[in-house]
Each structure stands twice: as structure tokens, then as C-alpha cells.
Image (cartoon, helix red, strand yellow):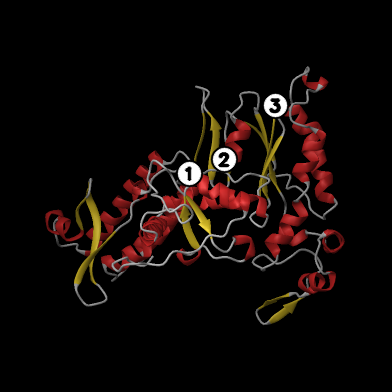
Amino acid sequence: MEQCFKALRSANTQWILEGDIKSCFDKISHDWLLAHVPIDRAILQKWLKSGYMEKHVLHETTDGTPQGGIISPALANCALDGLERLLHEKYPAGKRLKSLGGEKPCVNLVRYADDFVITSKSKELLEGEIQPLVVQFLQERGLELSPMKTVITHVEHGFDFLGQNVRRYPNGKLLIKPSKKNVGTFLDGIRRIIKDAHGVSAADLIDQLNPKIRGWANYHRHVVSKRTFGRVDHTLFSSLWKWVQRRHPNKSPRWFKPKYFARRGNRDWSFFGDTCDGEGRPTKVWLHYAKSTPIKRHVKVKGEANPYDPTYETYFEEREGAHMLETFRGTRTLRYLWYEQRGLCAQCNTKITRITGWRLHYGVPRVKGGSTGATNCVLLHPECHDRVHRLRLPVSKPRLLYRGVRRA
């Protein structure tokens, strides 16, 4: 979605081709895959021709690759790889077209698996040149665009992509929000769980709801979601209030309010349930509200970066360190490493502070199978980290010289 934002933030990019491949996994050509995928052909052919079981009956597979198969997503990506390169070769960035009055075409492809959108400055360019080019590209692989679902849309009208709605508003701002369809589907599932919770305790109901709410909110936390989260929480509260009323039809709100709702932090009327911990002591479990999920913009991985290329080892170490700061687990690991090293850099043996900064370094490089656990990590000053990689200096893991350090 970050790439979608970058491609559409220019006012010159106005039109979008929303591509929908008809039965992508079911129609991929076996002959094309066997001829172009760089893998042992005998093994690949066995994967493709293995068939599938349905109601104890074996069905042959002459085309496509089964959805849910381990190799299927990789094969689909191999089949669709090359479309972006083809578009960039025909419409390179910065090139001006005579057909557009000497203006840039602003052609970009954003793809995730078999879902993709193509941007352009002109609707005519999408209809007359780009769409036929995509059709030809897919035909070579045994695929075709769905004529009903493939549409060309103006960015001011907005479009849905990967559960998000992308639209440029009249004030010129491009905003990406959770789509109405995605929110509706999520809330329908939540209402169904609550409605079917007959004879279920509040704690057990929370155990069912929390993973779904947390997962959905984490998926949408990278876009403009705060207001949507608030509306979802309001709907969730209304459904839970009806559940409580149905559970205690003869009780008044004054009775079941303190039994199911309480103040927690800055939120009043937080839903909770009573349960017992592993040692049998009474405790409370609280409902996770979508709005409590912080909005955090996603930082794209560089397009050319490869985690298996030693050239980008430092780059991925820095991303890992930044990611660790954003998570409780990561923060605890960093705290453990800081105490383990007595607050000293493992290379120059001087203090690591917020002013000096730090870098996470792996003793055994990731490209050689090293783990991301605390046993394979040390903290270094940024300049020491650069020197270690530049001169290929060895870094030894310090030993704990005193007790009292909690393990990560």
C-alpha cells in the first residue's frame, strides 16, 4: 500500500486499471511453467500433475496449480513476474509521449500475488495500449483478465485494493483507508461470534474476539484508520451490550454495568471477564479495542534489497533493530543485551547511550544461517558497526559478570 501511495501521490497520476485475473491459480499453463521456472523439471512436473483429493476421489490436474498448495504462491509469482519490467521498458520513468502532448505517462504497476493495479495519466493510454499489452502478457501464460471485474477508474472516485480504499479527495489529499466492504465483512464475523456465544462466559468470549480484533487492526494500522477503528469499537460495544442484555434479561443496566464493564486507563466502559490464572488466582481479561492499536506507517523495503545478499546485511540489521524497538519482545531483548554488555559497546568497550546511538550486529550473519535471537546479537556503536563490516573484524559475545539480569 505504501507503493500505491507513492505511485498516486503525484497530481499527474489520475487513472487506474484495476486488474482481476480470471481463475489465476486454476488456469496457469503447465507448459509455460515447465519451460520458464528455474527449478528441477521432474520435481516441478510431479507437483503440477499430482492432482487433488475431494471426497476420497483423486482428480487429475491438467492446468493450474491447487490453491493452498505449498508451491502454488511461488509459481503464481513466477508466472506474473516480468509484467512490471515490461511496462518500465515500454514506458520508462521520465519519458514523454507525443500521444499525451509531450507529457509523462506516469505508468506504475503495484502487484500483490494476482491482484494488481496499473496507474496512468490518461484513460486512453490504459484502454488503447496498456490493457492489450497486459492481455497479451497473460495469454502467453494461459491466463486472462476478467472482463466483468477489470475496470478503469479515476483516482478521485476511489478504488478498493487489498482491503483498503484509495482515493484522492477534492482538497487534493490522497488517503488510504480500510474499505467499507472489508470493514463490513469483519463486523459481520464479529457479530456472528457474539450472537452464537450462548452460555459462554465473558472471559471465553473475549478469548475468541481478541485475536480477530488484534489481527484485523494490525493489518490496517499502517493506513488512515483511526476513525474507522473508533466506529468499529462503537459497533463492537453495541453488540456486546445486546449480548449482556440477552444473557441477563431480568437485570437492570445498573446491575450488569459493574459486572461486565469498568474503567481501564483512559477508556470507560471497557468490557472484561473474570477468570483464573495458572495458579488458580482470580484475574480479569480485557477486550482489545481496535482504537488502542497505534497507527504506524510502514517503511518499505528497498526494491533491490535481498536478505540473502551480504551487501545488504547491514541494511536488514538496521531494519531489524528499528522493528525491535516497536515491539515489547524486541525492547526486552535490547534491554537484556544492554545489561549483558554492562552498557558497553562490544567492539570499543565504551558506553552506549541514547546520544551515541547503537546498531544491532549478528555474530553469525543471517546469510550464513545465524538466528535473530539474543544469543547471536550484540550492540555496537554505529561507527564501530560500520568499521566491523568494512574491515571484517571479529566480535566476541561478552559474558555476564554479575547476576540479576533477566533472560530475554
Residue 95 seen in render: yes
Residue placed under numbered mark 1 in the picture: 222
Indicate the amino acid at tag 2: Glu
- Can you tell which mark lies on residue 121? 3
**Percent of width and height locating residue 57:** 71, 81
**Percent of width and height locating residue 92:** 78, 32
188 relative to 176, above or below: below
Residue at image location 34% in from the left, 66% down from the top: 207
**Percent of width and height locating residue 9:** 58, 29
Indicate the amino acid at tag 1: His
Indicate the amino acid at tag 3: Lys
Residue farthest to the top, as pictured: 101
Disc 1 to disc 2: CB gap under 8 Å: yes
Disc 3 to disc 2: CB gap under 8 Å: no
Q: Which of 245 and 309 is in front in this view?
A: 309
Residue placed under numbered mark 2 in the picture: 2
Q: In which quarter of the image is the C terminus?
A: bottom left
Residue at image location 80% in from the left, 23% down from the top: 97
40 relative to 313, above or below: below
Q: What element carries label 3?
A: loop
Q: How far apart are marks 1 and 3 (CA)?
A: 27 Å
**Corner quadrant of residue 245:** bottom left
